[in-house]
Amino acid sequence: MGGKVTCTLGEVKQRADFIVYWGGNPAECHPRHFTKYTIMQKSKFLPRGRKDRTMVLVDIRETKSAKAADIFLQVKPGKDFELITILRAMIKDQHVTDEQIAVTGLSREVLDDLVGRMKGAKFGCMFFGMGLSMTRGKHMNSAALLTLAAEMNAFTKFVAMPMRGHGNVTGADVIMRWQTGFPFGITFNRGYPRYNPGEFSTVDVLVRGDCDAAFIIGADPGATMPQPAIEHLKRIPTIVLDPHVTHTSRLSRVHITTAPQGIAAPGTAYRMDEIPLPLKPPLKSPYPTDEQVVRRINEAIAAKPFWMPEGSQPQMLTAQV
Amino acid sequence: MTKKRFILNASRSSKQGTLINVGKDSEEYLELTNTMTMSAGDMAEIGLAEGQTALVRTEFGEAPFKCQAGKVPEGMIFIPYGPPTCLLMGGDTDGTGMPTSKGWEVDVTPL
């Protein structure tokens, strides 16, 4: 089973009476999530707001989000996959031993209660964060949770959604998916898109030293990526487009200051539920937008003679403007 | 006696998110990203005082962090993401494209 059974945040706001946050701390990292979409809002179907909704938090420590939760489940570090797999078995009344449950740090009574509540909900939504996707197991953890959400639909309506962070990371995935069929980890080195995470993904390409130049738009890998990747960015010509001077700017050969998106540059940002939202800049900037800079670079490249011998050009994608 | 090992989790906080916009060179941001939180019991066990610096070492790198006691489970350390945690991160993504940033086994040596 694959894919993501999901919905928009509007549907969550209107209908979700059972919310699970797994490996995330929205009280600190998405501070308006509770109030705008998930637990505080009153709606046509949930007229009493918070009283009509149940919130469960699954995490390895008691974060600030635990105060807002009805049920807090403290799972042992690195045992999320085991817990999700146990829940997948328990919803189908398959046998699970006490030893298997004990590995997760929780008890059978707690899990029985959780399964009962999940099945009894009218509309359940599981949000998962980096506590699930960036620990051991990574995409296997996410896939297990998405499968649990899909399988819960045999009993009631259930969906899952990743808690995306930072400005418009969802937009990058959505646009790459729309343009190439793949969300990330794509190479165009044969003239057509190929996808292979671990091989063509940014960190891996940098750590192996596969690329001999880097062009970075609105990101700061110099302050966020593993040190071996940062070391390679220092070795090669790195070009940065950013409204601010960042750690990456300092290790780059060229920094071009651009107007900040949404403040002085127009565009479209994608919400975590993949809804596109137009950005209307209230201010003007003396700096060009990222789009203007990229277009000028494209024009300058197009004006140069093609670098490969005639007759050896790979099949090129038609540029979408 | 074998040395106690800890599980380190890089994490986010609202203060860190706000300070990114203030500037990653600001004193507060540097202070925050160079501070680790662990349980008071663990600190006493390895002889760390509040505010003391300790060297955190993974199999990939090491970095010094100021220590503070907090409400975290025994055996665990939490540090906000930032340039110092990059020093501890290995480049292997296990074929996923995503480096591991949580659940590292680390040694902690008081300085």
Image (cartoon, coloured by chain):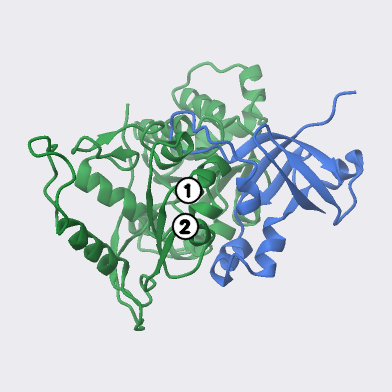
Chain colours: A green, B blue
Could you say where residue A204 lies in the image, as x and y percent from the top left?
44, 36
Q: Does label 1 or label 2 sit earlier along the sequence?
A: 1
A205, above or below B80, in the image: above
Question: Are the residues flagged by discs 1 and 2 in contact, CB closer than 8 Å?
Answer: yes
Could you say where residue A86 lies in the image, as x and y percent from the top left?
53, 25
The residue shown at (27%, 40%) is A182
Query: Is residue A31 at least partly visible in the picture?
Result: yes
- Mark 2 belongs to which subunit? A
A305, above or below A108, in the image: below
What residue is disc 1 on?
Answer: A233
Distance of label 1 from label 2 (alpha carbons): 7 Å
From the viewer's perspective, tell me whether residue A155 is left or right of residue B54.
left
Farthest residue in the left direction? A311
Looking at the figure, which quarter contains the C terminus of chain A?
Answer: bottom left
Mark 1 lies on a secondary structure that is: helix
A264, above or below A156, in the image: below
The residue shown at (52%, 32%) is B92
Amino acid tagged 1: Leu
From the viewer's perspective, tell me whether residue A253 is left or right of residue B21.
left
From the viewer's perspective, tell me whether residue A305 is left or right of residue A32.
left
Looking at the figure, which quarter contains the N terminus of chain A?
Answer: top left
Label annotation for residue B87: none
Label annotation for residue A252: 2
From the viewer's perspective, tell me whether residue B34 is left or right of residue A204.
right
Mark 2 lies on a secondary structure that is: loop
Q: Quick one: A219 or A50, which is closer to the camera?
A: A219
Could you say where residue B6 lies in the image, as x and y percent from the top left?
75, 35
Give the image quarter of residue A79: top right
The residue shown at (36%, 83%) is A283
The residue shown at (14%, 54%) is A320
